[in-house]
Image: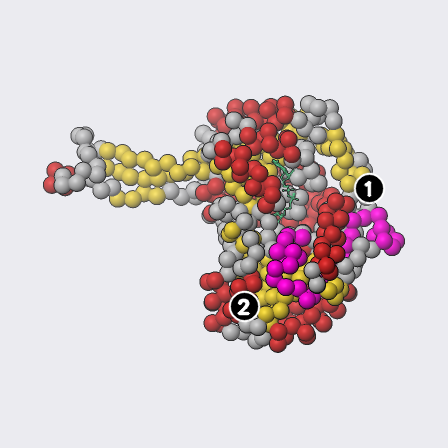
């Protein structure tokens, strides 16, 4: 593999440079090295991609769904074969440590196989009709052309969450990945192409969001926008899509919390906190950026958490000794670090980390020390805003009631967890947590692809990815009535029952 690659768009079955003739750089966040020059697309590229997707829709929607599923199975097999190479490229491109990158690829494989199976399911409803000699059923139809817009933190898994259900249901796709992770997007498209996807069914347009994204979202040829990213961008996209009455599915930010009650196994909770707060350098939408600890156990918990955070080794995700890799970019590093003075000004204390290391090899990359903030109050900015870096804030409470109140006090509602040995508290928490995902005696990360994934409140707009729920995003229900009585039967005519009896 050449060390600097040229990454192009994929439109109507061909790899093509951007119409602008421009490129942008793809940088290794651990070393600052250039990995690839990437097509910087313009509106004309979006137009071509959408036109190709619309043309392909005519035959793809008629392609038998089990055959669509077979293409997905083949894609899953190719991903499995290329797993190590994909994981290494992912680590280079966005920094997560290799075992996590392998997990990201595996999640993509799992989703691809799962949705491959939907080729032979896509169950509809057949229900009794209220009139004699009449048949009533509902079936799924594709929505049309899907714009899949994805973030950089799960560069393979998240695109598969969107592209695989869209394809198996008979939609065609224009895929716009985050500009920090174009390489994994190119790999995914290569894989689906090799698996036998007809030309035009999946198109790739590379480039930053902004104008390009606005053009894609507002394009009259796009029927559905499936977006995962920040709440600000999600709200902007929803506004554009809403005005045009497009279907817009948004999976957005989080401010997830782990609650540790006084009857918890504290050491077990520590494992969950360290993994959920600092895994993927805190750059998971489900990362635990708050720990809500019962006062009775808080001091001991903080001491141990600080000790564990200080021991985590920063470094390149390709090194086996590394626990925490870099954050994705210099601007993200600045943003994460800007929360340290904000926290201190509001009265919080840095108990561990808080620095950007400037020594040795770490100085070349975008590293931030794993950070534990204490003396945090629920209304402080660090307890309310998504930081998306290796920073967690400990808030002390006096019991389950206050814990739930604090948990629900942010605008987000993605994931949460509780550590307790009291079954009554666990069930109350499961019922009252205003989040789309709840864990008991486990951290806030680790969702499985066969259950719905998404959040309440400002984390989304009511849709869910993954599992059966994803099918509802990428399909239209069509209800069909077949009257085989050979005469006019009038439904909803009160008082005419006698006439309709057999
Ligand atoms: P982002 O909002 O900056 O970008 C996401 C995508 O939107 C990128 O592809 C970007 O190029 C594109 N984009 C930007 N402006 C656009 C516009 N005007 N029109 C169309 N597209 C546009 O988010 P990010 O920094 O890439 O990702 C981090 C965020 O994603 C965090 O907030 C995180 O919580 C969230 N996230 C949520 C989930 C979830 O399922 N809830 C999963 C992963 C990440």
Location of residue 196 (image quadrant): top right
- CA separation in Å, label 2 and label 1: 48 Å
* Residue 33: mark: 1
Left or right placement of residue 142 versus residue 30 in this view = left
Label 2 or label 1, whichever comes before in sequence order: 1
Image quarter where ligand 1 lies: top right
The yes-or-no answer for disc 2 within 8 Å of ligand 1 is no
Q: Does residue 44 lie above or below 330 as drawn?
A: above
Q: Which mark is residue 402?
A: 2
Q: Position of residue 346 (x, y in %)?
A: 69, 60
Identify the magenta region.
358-387
Q: Specify few, some or many for label 2: CA neighbours under 10 Å numbering under 14, 14-19, or 20 or more.
A: some
In the displayed structure, 73 sits above or below 385; it is above
Is 484 placed left or right of 78 in the picture?
left
Which element type, helix, strand or loop, lies under badge 2? helix
Q: Height in image: 46 above or below 122?
A: above
Give the residue drawn at x 66%, y 47%.
153
């Amino acid at each position: 593999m050449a060390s600097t690659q040229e990454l192009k768009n994929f439109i109507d079955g061909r790899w093509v440079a951007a119409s602008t003739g421009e490129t942008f750089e793809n940088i290794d966040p651990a070393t600052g090295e250039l990995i690839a020059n990437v097509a910087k697309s313009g509106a004309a590229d979006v137009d071509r991609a959408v036109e190709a997707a619309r043309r392909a829709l005519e035959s793809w929607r008629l392609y038998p769904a089990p055959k669509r599923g077979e293409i997905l199975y083949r894609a899953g097999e190719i991903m499995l074969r290329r797993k190590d190479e994909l994981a290494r490229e992912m680590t280079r491109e966005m920094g997560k440590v290799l075992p996590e990158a392998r997990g990201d690829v595996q999640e993509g494989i799992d989703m691809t196989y799962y949705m491959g199976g939907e080729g032979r399911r896509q169950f509809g409803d057949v229900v009794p009709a209220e009139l004699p000699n009449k048949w009533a059923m509902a079936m799924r139809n594709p929505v049309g052309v899907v714009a899949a817009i994805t973030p950089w933190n799960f560069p393979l898994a998240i695109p598969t969450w969107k592209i695989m259900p869209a394809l198996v249901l008979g939609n065609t796709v224009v895929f716009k990945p985050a500009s920090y992770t174009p390489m994994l997007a190119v790999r995914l498209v290569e894989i689906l192409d090799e698996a036998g996807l007809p030309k035009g069914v999946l198109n790739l347009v590379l480039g930053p969001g902004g104008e390009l994204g606005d053009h894609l979202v507002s394009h009259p040829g796009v029927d559905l926008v499936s977006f995962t990213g920040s709440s600000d961008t999600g709200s902007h996209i929803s506004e554009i899509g809403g005005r045009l009455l497009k279907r817009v599915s948004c999976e957005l930010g989080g401010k997830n919390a782990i609650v540790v009650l006084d009857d918890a196994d504290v050491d077990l909770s520590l494992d969950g906190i360290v993994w959920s707060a600092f895994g993927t350098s805190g750059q998971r939408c489900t990362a635990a950026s708050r720990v809500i600890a019962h006062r009775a156990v808080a001091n001991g918990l903080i001491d141990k958490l600080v000790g564990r955070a200080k021991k985590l080794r920063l470094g390149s995700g390709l090194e086996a000794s590394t626990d925490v890799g870099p954050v994705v970019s210099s601007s993200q590093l600045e943003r994460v670090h800007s929360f340290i003075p904000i926290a201190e000004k509001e009265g919080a204390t840095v108990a561990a980390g808080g620095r950007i290391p400037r020594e040795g090899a770490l100085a070349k990359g975008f590293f931030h020390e794993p950070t534990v903030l204490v003396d945090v109050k629920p209304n402080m900015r660090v307890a309310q805003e998504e930081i998306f870096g290796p920073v967690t804030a400990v808030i002390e409470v006096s019991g389950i009631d206050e814990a739930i109140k604090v948990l629900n006090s942010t605008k987000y509602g993605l994931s949460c967890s509780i550590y307790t040995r009291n079954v009554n508290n666990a069930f109350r928490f499961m019922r009252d947590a205003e989040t789309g995902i709840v864990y008991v005696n486990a951290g806030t990360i680790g969702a499985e692809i066969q259950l719905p994934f998404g959040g309440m409140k400002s984390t989304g707009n009511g849709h869910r990815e993954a599992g059966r729920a994803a099918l509802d995003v990428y399909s239209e229900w069509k209800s069909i009535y077949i009257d085989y009585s050979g005469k006019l039967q009038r439904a909803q005519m009160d008082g005419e029952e006698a006439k309709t009896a057999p």
